[in-house]
Amino acid sequence: MHHYFIVTKQFKHFVECFCPDGEHEDMLTIKRGEFIEVTNERTYVLDQGWYNMVILNSEKSFYMALDDIEKYFLKGYILSLMDLELNINHLKFQVDQSLGHGDEDSFLEATNGLKKSEELKTKLEAHVNKITENQLM
């Protein structure tokens, strides 16, 4: 099963090449709103660990260290659909709390975050649905 993520914050990732001359190495800038699909295709590199095949925006594929994927996830640079749903629920709670306390600053901050999270969720859902439809054809 493939795992789909959406980028929430721009970051740079160094794409490693396992060729003897390293000719395919590259520094990628991965931007907010882009999609990362982590596939089941894996390889183990001695002294470096596990790498999964990653597909960026359904176009570019490369191996990414499992440690890097975990690091980006823990830093909040990438989120899954479930993470976005949890974030939306939490932000809705914060909106309700700020309304109850009459805290305008917290309300504005929470509603802004809620809007951004809902936009990312809609975008990721559309992307996953498109991929699913293409696989059924």
Image (cartoon, grey):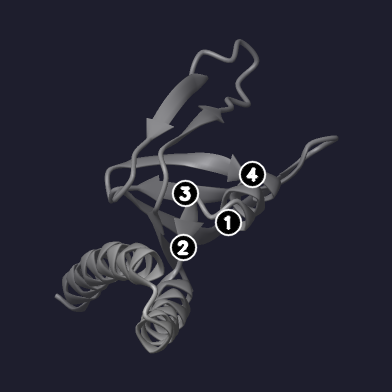
Looking at the picture, tell me which residue is in the foreground, 58 or 112: 112
Q: Is residue 92 above or below residue 23?
A: below
If you read the primary sequence from the N terminus, does the residue marked by circle 3 or circle 1 appear first?
3
* Number of marks in the rendered image: 4
List the residue tagged with mark 3.
54
Q: Which residue shows up at 40% across the image and 29% down it?
A: 29
The three-letter code of the residue at mark 2 reads Leu
Location of residue 62 with respect to 42 vertically, above or below: above
Q: CB atoms at circles 1 and 2 under 8 Å apart? A: yes
Q: How crowded is mark 4: few (under 14 residues within 10 Å), some or many (20 or more)?
A: few
Which secondary structure lies at badge 2?
strand
At which x and y percent is residue 129? 21, 75
* Marks 3,2: beta carbons within 8 A: no
Q: Say which amino acid is labelled 1.
A: Phe
Distance from Cα at disc 4 to Cα at disc 3: 11 Å
Of the two numbered discs 3 and 2 in the rendering, the one whose residue sits closer to the viewer: 2
Vertical position of residue 107 compared to residue 71: above or below: below
The image shows residue 117 at horizontal and vertical percentages of: 33, 67
Q: Is disc 4 placed on a helix, strand or loop?
A: helix
Instruction: Quickly name the residue at label 4.
Output: 68
| Mark 3 nearby-residue class (10 Å; few <14, some 14–19, many ≥20) | many
Give whichever of discs 4 and 1 has the lower sequence position.
4
Q: Earlier in the sequence, mark 4 or mark 3?
A: 3
Residue position for label 1 = 73
